[in-house]
Image (tube, rainbow, N blue to C red):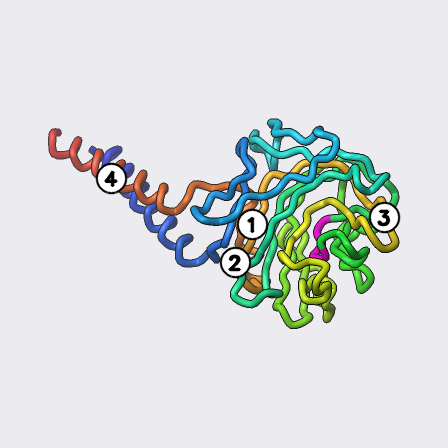
Amino acid sequence: MKLLHALARLCTGITLLASAQAFALPTPLATWNFNGTLAAAEAGAPALTAIDPLGANAFVTDMVFGVSQTVYQFNGNALPANQQAGLSVSTNGLLTAPNAYTVDMIFKFNVDNGSWKSILNASDRTSDNAFYVSPGNKLQVYPVADGPSTFTFGDYHRISLTNNGAGHVTAYFDGIFQFDLLTTVMDFSTYGAANPDHLLTFFADNLFDGGQGEFVSGSVAQIRLYDGELSGGDVGELPNGSLPEPGTLLLVGLSLTALARARRLRL
């Protein structure tokens, strides 16, 4: 009997925790978990488009923060630039304000190329100005400024970028604040007709302008896209990877509680 009471209390706690998470955590517009597909977890959200000129990208199993899961490898050559690999997605019709968004991603780069490593650009690969790991292995929105934390290779990191849509960009490294900038580098409107679909491009560097070849192969475990600029507190509370949906936890909790009560009545 005591065991059943304890189980019921535990299930109630799980239910309350799930409900609290449902209210506390911001809701993404799209979540890409790379569990064998480039489709988003949310109904109606767009799938990612693969940039895979060599046909070498693949879903594989890897350890991400101590958990075995499926990830998406992007494999290409730094030069020529049209042999780089990555992903892209159109944000047209998704964002309340066209330039205001937050991207939260878990990925690794395989090696340090001693140069720049492209993370994200808003120019449809037409400009060298973008979000990078710098030659000094710091996060940087080029050409503005970089942050203090050191990016390591062969390790997964959670990298987040927020943009308020009015020239204010903030970056976080594993949930830790890196820099707060006044720049329009990550605004779609900066590039005008060069990016009519408001594409976000992940990992593949620019095909035009200077500074081509700033690319490293790697793997991505998750990408989340949010509407507007998340606060530092919001970014810090985001989970490192896929967790059971709060609704799933709620159902499990209620089911176990009901089972415990039924067994208590029989006893």
What range is drawn magenta here?
119-123
Q: Is residue 144 left or right of residue 20?
A: right
What is the distance, in whole Å, between disc 4 and disc 1 at their CAs? 33 Å
Q: Residue type at mark 2?
A: Leu
Q: Earlier in the sequence, mark 2 or mark 4?
A: 2
Residue 46 on image: x %, y %: 52, 47
Task: Residue type at mark 3: give it.
Answer: Gln
Res. 176 image quadrant: bottom right
Going by the picture, which residue comes out furthest to the left? 266
Q: Nearer the viewer, residue 227 or 69?
A: 227
Q: Which mark is residue 224?
A: 1
| Residue 183 - label | none
Q: Quadrant of the N terminus?
A: top left
Q: Residues within 10 Å of mark 1 (few under 14, many from 20)?
A: many
Identify residue for label 2.
94
Q: Nearer the viewer, residue 55 or 147?
A: 55
Q: Identify which amino acid the numbered label 4 is placed on.
A: Thr
Look at the picture and state if 163 lies above or below 247. below
In 3D space, how far apart are the residues under numbered discs 2 and 1 (Cα atoms)? Answer: 13 Å
- Tag 2, which secondary structure? loop
- Which marked residue is nearer to the observer: mark 2 or mark 1? 2
Rounded to the nearest angstrom, the CA distance separating label 2 from label 4 is 39 Å
Rendering coords of residue 224 (x, y %) = 56, 49
* Disc 1/disc 3 C-alpha distance (Å): 27 Å
Disc sitting over residue 212 in the figure? 3
Where residue 253 sits, quadrant-wise, is top left
Label 1, secondary structure: give it: strand
Image coordinates of residue 249 in percent, x first then y, are 36, 42
Q: Which mark is residue 257?
A: 4
Residue at position x 69%, y 41% in the image? 86
